[in-house]
Image (cartoon, rainbow, N blue to C red):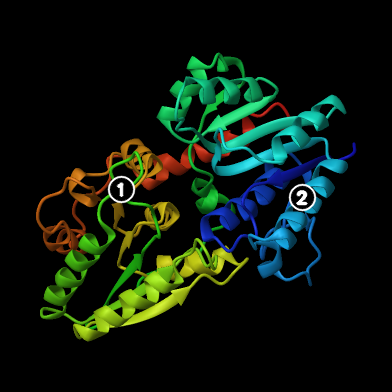
Amino acid sequence: MTALRTAFTGYYGMRNFGDDLFGVLCTRAAQTYWRAAPRVVGPPLAAAPARSTVPRRYPTRWYGSTGLVGKASRWLSFARGIHDCDVLVMGGGSVITARESFRKPMMLSAVERGVQLAAIGVSIGPFADARDEDAVAAFLQRFRYLSVRDERSRRLAQAMGLQAITHAGCDLAALLPVLGPRTAGPASGQGAPVRIGVAPCRYREDGEYAAPSRRRWEEHLIAALADLRRMREVHVDVFSLNEHPRHGDRELARALVDRLRTEGVAAEHRPYASQDPLHTVDALAACDVVVSARLHGAIVAYLQDVPFMIIDYHPKCRDFADDIGLDASLRVTADRAGNPFSDALPALLAGERQPRVSRADYARRAPDIFQCAPWAKA
């Protein structure tokens, strides 16, 4: 039989760790569970067993740019992706929104040619009003399969009348233990420094969702790390998990490194090695504790059995924390009083305050994301 021609589309190739990780795991899972011939709509991704719609030598800085060259690159890449596929899959992330895009009319046109649409490991919304929600519901009615990653999205899909195609799944990163097992781990042995991973994020503080002040939580974290350093040797890896020149975290990460060093805390900047997300998985797994504003810094830490705290700046952060039963003391929210890290970091290093849902139980749900699809092979 001819292999199912499957194209995966998302924010791949935009120099963002979480999105690139989706692309790698989607293509591996499609081979495993669908026996498909996967294709990445975007630049090539290291460790992804798939062709890509962008030539290997094409500069990723051009593809991800905000100008005319970048927009044209992404349009041509998407056109190539839907030209010769049987199934087009929106693979991972907060991609089901009311935001206008050239992709939606092209996807609906592809349906008329017989291409089937799916979305897996996604969140739905949030929406500004009922009109936006209705527009997205009409779009999703054209899909064959929809696997959502959180309970809030499942309820929204149900309210939209999409029960027949909706699967209550989890984040695609949960496939890591099955399809991308890593061997790295924290350094062991007496006298080894405590390694703390920190992943800042250039999020908005003036949106509808009450986000904690970046400056405030960073000052609290620096103070807590300085206190911890007085009791034991500490090394901090500051990750910039999004390296996009406009929307990324590089400058935030570098500034945080400088401020930590000023307080006498050893710190190093660890930029995302673009298009190689599994390398960054290893680096996160080598930490003893992770503090992350980037959602997938927190999710990967959880899946690698690394204790973590999450900066709750967006509904997707709250949704994930709710889904795994993360202790309230490990969520840095806008209304938290005092220094949230002072007690939490020592407790995590002592092995306390585990999420209610174990990493094994969460990851056990991941294969169903693909196995429940209409194209899954027995």
Q: Position of residue 134 (x, y in %)?
A: 55, 19
Which numbered tag is attached to residue 256? none
Mark 2 lies on residue: 75
Q: Position of residue 22 (x, y in %)?
A: 59, 51
Please identify, in this view, whether the residue under mark 2 or under mark 1 is nearer the observer: 2
Q: Position of residue 357 (x, y in %)?
A: 33, 40
Residue shown at the point (60%, 37%) measured from the top left: 120
Q: CA distance from mark 2 to mark 1?
A: 33 Å
Residue type (three-letter) at the residue carrying disc 2: Trp
158 relative to 93, above or below = above
Which numbered tag is attached to residue 312? 1
Compare marks 2 and 1 and give the one earlier in the sequence: 2
374 relative to 4, above or below = above
Is 250 left or right of 325, judged from the image as shown? right
If the image is split into quadrants, where does the N terminus sit?
Answer: top right
Residue 114: image quadrant is: top right
Residue shown at the point (20%, 44%) measured from the top left: 328
If the image is split into quadrants, where does the C terminus sit?
Answer: top right
Q: Position of residue 32 (x, y in %)?
A: 69, 45
- Name the foreground residue: 333 vs 120: 333
